Image (cartoon, rainbow, N blue to C red):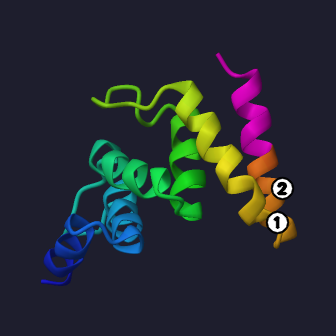
Amino acid sequence: EAVKELAASAGSGHRQAQFVLGLLHADGVENVLPADPCRALPLWSDAARRGHYAAQVSVARDWLRGRYDACPGRPAREEIAGFLVTAAPQAKADYYQGLLVADLQERLATSR
């Protein structure tokens, strides 16, 4: 029942609901939702495009790990780079977030 409510909020464009529902799809929930990164991708991508920091770094991390290689609507490298550029100023307030964004940017620059 909670997943239905979360999906309704995500469907109305609430960025945090999109991120959380995407997280549930990305990791799966035992006996509730199977792990399915292709269902997480559109949720995180939409939230990331609208400036949600956690969605920006999560979609970039999973893109670099190849989790979306078989997914329709897979973002292009340039969009992933843009998510990280947008996330970088938000990460400056926290040392570890800054390290994460810098690491993802470096990995993206050196990946194929």
The disc at residue 96 is: 1
**Over which residues does the magenta segment extend?**
103-112
Indicate the quadrant containing the C terminus: top left, top right, bottom left or bottom right.
Answer: top right
The quadrant holding residue 5 is bottom left
Q: Name the residue located 80 percent from the left edge and 34 percent from the top edge.
A: 106
Identified by mark 1, the residue type is Tyr
10 Å neighbourhood of mark 2: few (<14), some, or many (≥20)? some
Drawn side of residue 30 relative to residue 67, left or right: left
Drawn side of residue 107 relative to residue 40, left or right: right
10 Å neighbourhood of mark 1: few (<14), some, or many (≥20)? few
Q: Name the residue located 50 percent from the left edge and 31 percent from the top edge.
A: 66
Q: Element under label 2?
A: helix
x%, y% of residue 96?
82, 65
The quadrant holding residue 29 is bottom left
The quadrant holding residue 91 is bottom right
Question: What's the CA distance linking mark 2 and mark 1?
Answer: 5 Å
**Residue nearer the viewer, 85 or 39:** 85
Q: Is residue 10 above or below residue 105?
A: below
Q: Is residue 66 above or below residue 15?
A: above
The disc at residue 65 is: none
Q: Element under label 1?
A: helix
Q: Which residue is mark 2?
A: 99
